[in-house]
Amino acid sequence: MRILAVDDEKPALELISECIHDADMSASVHCFDSPRKALEFAKTTEFDVAFLDIEMPEISGIALAKRLKLINHHVQIIFVTAYKDYAFDAYQLNAKGYLLKPVTVRDIKNKLDGIFRPNEPEASGMYASTFGQFDFFVDGVPVKFRRSKSKEMLAYLIDQQGKGVTRKDMALVLFEDRAYDDMVQDYIKKIFRDLKASLDNSGIGDIIIKKYNYYAVDTSRFVCDMYEYCRDNPDYINRFNGAYMSQYSWGESKLGELIYGSDMHN
């Protein structure tokens, strides 16, 4: 296993390195006290796991993680922080993506033992999976849609992150090569009715907001990997695989934002 460790404080970096070696004597550990040097190394050398300090002056650990994921989609990120209140209020001490300083051998071993388990949909509640192909889950079970266009309509509403979408805007997405005539307008209405029926069958029809000529989703009702990635939730940074809504051509625009729109200067 090849492991990258980055911390601008050398004593902390040395401790992380020692703990990794003690936890897995076969691991190859590459340590850097400069995020920029770590990035240069990552461009030429594949590695499996990165332990990153969060608070660093050149580039924050969060920004560094996103850049590393662009270079190697499969790398697993573990953040190391001295600040208990940095994000632990939100993700708690047992969150997969965090370690609290000073690290211990047991901490490192526990993370390495568990980090390569495949990412599963949330076991309870509603979950929108957008990294790769789109699916929507209720208690771990994918919602069945009557029409593929109904599923695509939900995907686009989720992509819009709660922003209202008019019927005409939706038609331009779902039927980009057709004129917005009465037939297309009626078809959009039918697709929406089918979408609502599919969601109602799963008991979640109220995630959709409908007003006159206006559709949206209630983003507070479900977890979405893309939303959490943009909020810098470390577990969802790990889930990013370089793809977004891959069955829909319009997903390429958001993918570009995820890749190039992140704050890479902090």
Image: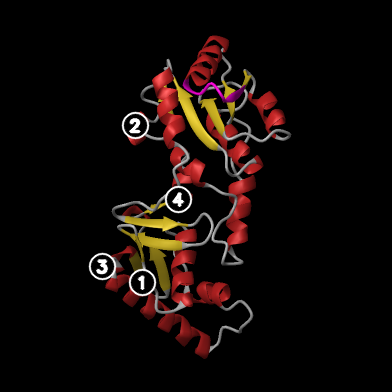
Q: Secondary structure at mark 1?
A: strand
Marks 4 and 1 sit apart, C-alpha to C-alpha, by 27 Å
What is the secondary structure assignment of the residue under circle 3?
loop
* 28 in the magenta segment: yes
Q: Quadrant of residue 180?
A: bottom right
Residue 24's place in the image compared with 63, above or below, is: above
Whether 24 is among the magenta residues is: yes
Q: Which residue is mark 2?
A: 94
Q: Amino acid at mark 1?
A: Lys
In depth, the one of 68 and 3 nearer the eye is: 3
Q: Nearer the viewer, mark 4 or mark 1?
A: 4
Mark 2 → mark 4, Cα distance in angstroms = 19 Å
Helix, strand or loop at mark 4: helix
For marks 4 and 3 on the same chain, the one whose residue lies earlier in the sequence: 3
Q: Is residue 230 visible?
A: no
Q: In terms of depth relative to the viewer, which is nearer, 103 or 167?
A: 103
Q: Real-space Cα distance between discs 1 and 2?
A: 41 Å
Q: Position of residue 102 (x, y in %)?
A: 42, 15
Q: Name which residue type carries label 3.
A: Gly
Q: Which residue is mark 3?
A: 203
**Residue mark closest to the camera, 1 vs 3:** 3
- Residue stretch rendered in magenta on the structure: 23-29
